[in-house]
Amino acid sequence: MSSNHEFHHFKQNFHWRVVSKSFQGQPPKPSQYENLISNSSNKFPFLFNLEDSSTSTSSGGKVTSSVTRAVLNVLKSSTRANSTLKLNISANNVDGDPGNQKYLVYLCDDTAWCGGWGDRQRGLVSLYLLSLAYNRTYGILMTSPCDLAQFYQPNKIFWSFDPHLLKNKTSKVIYAVDSGSLKLDSKGKPLEDVVYIQTNMDMVPAIRKHFRSQMPKWVLQKSRPAIFREVWQRLMKPTPRLQKRLDDLLLSGKDTGKLVCAHVRIGYSKNLPNDPPRMDIASIDILWNFMENIQNVRKYFVATDNDDVRISARGRFGDLYVDTGGTILHIDRQRNRNESCVGFETAILDQLALTKCDILIISASNFSIRGSMLKTVLKNIYQFDGTLIKPFSPFSRFRHRRHVENSTTHSYEITVDNRNIEVYVLKI
């Protein structure tokens, strides 16, 4: 990514961070300005560690660069309470006036269908890359069934913003769920200042193909699943409250052995009366037998869309079994239910738990396929189709629903950092 592009990216995101917070009452004391920059560099290192730029150096955790100095000067020059800061940074004639900023925003509200959590993740990642292609500041506005910011917060890319800041800008909404075009401008007309897009599409290959010169090197070098993993980790981290829930769920009990997890997608049931059928619940014993045969288990975790699966797992695994215990619902099709926000949190927490497992069995579901891409250790992943359980890799060819024909494996157990890891080698 060019130095010019990095300056522009930093300028946009820093403005959103400062303006959305604003100064209430008296402005911070001058001694606090440097702390703000230092804290920002720690919280959002991607914005401060400018790639391919000779003007940026890091020393002792503090960032020193022409960008940092420019920000300090802007902050120190602002003496009025409740003022809106305008950041002007010159880099090859890049205008720093936030009034001239252009935005691309992922939108999911109650005006249209957004899709399930896995669908939304596809759209979120795709639109971040599209914002790079169009050189626009990226934002996320997901309020259906409730605000995403309750569960996830920005990590290295600051996507959170106050929509009221953009109310005086020209805007348009594009609905592109299940279909759509990469070309946002029409008939050569200038594109609006703010483009809101509702989509569940995986546009990563097309964006990489058609906007190569606008993409950072790592996008061109990584595989499609690896790009999803990288972008997601740059965008998202759990809120402290959700992280505590995850830790309480998975870290209690035995501290040695394997965390064995499964995602069971049944589809149509009393829980999801509007869903198509996915798997026969009568086949669930095949999965339980497989999980029981794994040695040295400290805990079993099951994420599912069906209460009867939870009941069956509790009966089978006893005290070693845990689940999130939250309301089961489809976050889009049942978003008008009173418990929809609890169901949203359940879905997000379920997927987060799947990413922490030593051994993971997924369903043919975008929810757990995306979870497998985010798994801390990208090994020991299987797929259950209702009949067979076979090794699965989200990074092999990205043909998730195509099973490996021969599932016979050699099993090896190794110890890494005092943790037992079971490694399966496919015999083909």
Image (tube, rainbow, N blue to C red):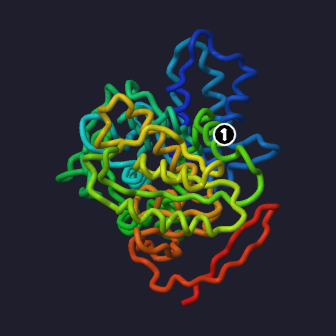
Looking at the rendered structure, the kind of residue marked 1 is Asp
Residue at screen point 55% across, 49% down: 314
Q: Is residue 368 left or right of residue 194?
A: right
Residue 324 screen position, x and y as percent: 54, 42
Report the front residue among 284 and 427.
Answer: 284
Q: Quadrant of the N terminus?
A: bottom right
Residue under the point 46% across and 68% down? 384
Residue plotted at (24% across, 46% down): 175
The mark total stands at 1
Residue position marked by numbered label 1 in the rendering: 248
Say which of 207 and 363 sits in front. Answer: 363
Residue at 33% in and 53% down: 200
Q: How many residues crowd around disc 1 within 10 Å: few (fewer than 14), some, or many (20 or more)?
A: few
| 392 to 59, vertically: above or below | below
Q: Residue furthest bottom?
A: 428
- Along the line of sight, which residue is nearer the eye, 194 or 115? 115
Position of 408 relative to 7 (above/below): below
The relative height of residue 304 versus residue 32 in the rendered view (above or below) is: below
Q: Position of residue 428 (x, y in %)?
A: 54, 90
Q: Secondary structure at mark 1?
A: helix
Whether 65 is drawn above or below 82: the answer is: below
Apparent side of residue 269 relative to residue 5 in the rendered image (left or right): left
Q: In the shown orientation, is residue 314 left or right of residue 244?
A: left
Please give left or right for residue 13 compared with residue 211 in the image: right
